Image (cartoon, helix red, strand yellow):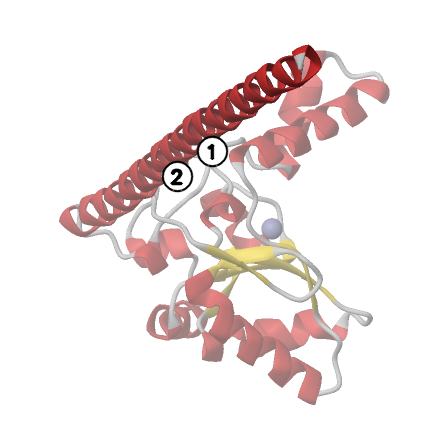
């Protein structure tokens, strides 16, 4: 009899414990679900804010550019004219991994395909560069001259003849490409035909006083077909075309 009572009490106690456990479990699940839901919502808000901000920023940049009446195709960048602030840029990858401004992708492909059809094998070996990448290139070049025994200042002066000062390279615009080919004939072909696709031979030897750059047969710059034709037929540089002779 005594044992039975004990068992009954024990059963009741166990039931209470089970009930309490279940209750605690439910409360715990509720708390966890609430916290998870809250953090997901917060994350969503953050992501939304970031993308809204980015959208605002890029439309502001575009607006600045429109207000200043600068045609992106004819943006002049050289040692006297650094990249304009808020320059809007969207890059895409080309075969081989280099990047270019999205807007020149199509004309560039047309030009390269035409060259291929003529039996050449052109490759884009350098396209868009960030200012940091340009800085790294400059540092490397300075180091090479220093290793040859030049002082830092001498090395820097020499390097600046070959590598554009960061912030003043057309590669930072995304509108220029360096093209390599198996044969030297590709450069001849480009000099004669690139204007048909909107590109110019940007640094010819006879314009180095004006462009501030030694001859670079591999460097092509997109300016649009109309400007490229005028520059090609007039045998002038982009600086002359734009009436911006800043060199001394
Ligand atoms: Zn180049």
Residue at horizontal 64%, vertical 12%? 6
- Front-lying residue, 228 or 1: 1
Residue at horizontal 46%, vertical 66%? 104
Return the x and y of residue 12 as percentages of the image width and height.
55, 20
Spatial separation of the CA atoms under disc 2 and disc 1 = 6 Å
- Front-lying residue, 89 or 219: 89
Residue, disc 2: 83
**Image-quadrant location for residue 94:** bottom right
Asked if residue 53 is positioned above or below residue 15 in the image, the reply reads below
Q: Is mark 2 within 8 Å of ligand 1?
A: no
**Neighbourhood count class around disc 1 (C-alpha, 10 Å): few under 14, some 14–19, many 20 upward:** many
Determine if residue 203 is in view. no
Q: Is mark 1 within 8 Å of ligand 1?
A: no
**Image-quadrant location for residue 160:** top right
Asked if residue 176 lies left or right of residue 98, the reply is left
Residue furthest toward the front? 1
Return the x and y of residue 213 as percentages of the image width and height.
56, 43
Asked if residue 229 is positioned above or below residue 169 in the image, the reply reads below
Residue at horizontal 20%, vertical 43%? 64
Residue, disc 1: 167
Ranked by sequence position, the earlier of labels 2 and 1 is 2
SS class, disc 1: loop
Please say if the residues under marks 2 and 1 sit with CB atoms less than 8 Å apart: yes
- Front-lying residue, 97 or 176: 97
**Neighbourhood count class around disc 2 (C-alpha, 10 Å): few under 14, some 14–19, many 20 upward:** many
Return the x and y of residue 30 as percentages of the image width and height.
42, 30
Residue furthest toward the bottom? 117
Residue at horizontal 50%, vertical 68%? 105
Asked if residue 8 lies left or right of residue 62, the reply is right
């Amino acid at each position: 009899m005594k044992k039975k009572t004990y068992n009954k009490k024990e059963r009741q106690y166990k039931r209470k414990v089970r009930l309490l456990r279940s209750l605690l479990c439910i409360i715990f699940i509720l708390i966890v679900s609430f916290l998870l839901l809250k953090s997901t919502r917060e994350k969503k808000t953050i992501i939304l804010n970031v993308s809204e901000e980015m959208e605002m920023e890029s439309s502001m940049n575009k607006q600045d550019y429109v207000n200043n009446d600068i045609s992106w195709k004819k943006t002049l960048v050289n040692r006297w004219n650094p990249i304009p602030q808020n320059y809007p840029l969207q890059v895409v990858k080309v075969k081989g991994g280099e990047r270019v401004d999205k807007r020149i992708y199509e004309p560039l492909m047309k030009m390269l395909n035409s060259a291929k059809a003529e039996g050449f094998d052109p490759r884009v070996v350098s396209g868009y560069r960030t200012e940091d990448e340009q800085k790294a290139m400059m540092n490397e070049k300075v180091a090479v001259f220093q290793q040859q025994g030049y002082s830092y200042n001498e090395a820097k002066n020499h390097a600046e003849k070959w590598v554009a000062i960061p912030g003043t390279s057309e590669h930072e615009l995304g509108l220029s490409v360096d093209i390599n080919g198996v044969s030297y004939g590709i450069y001849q072909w480009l000099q004669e035909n690139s204007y048909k696709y909107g590109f110019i031979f940007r640094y010819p030897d006879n314009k180095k006083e004006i462009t501030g750059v030694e001859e670079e047969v591999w460097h092509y710059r997109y300016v649009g077909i109309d400007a490229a034709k005028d520059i090609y037929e007039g045998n002038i540089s982009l600086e002359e075309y734009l009436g911006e002779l800043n060199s001394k």
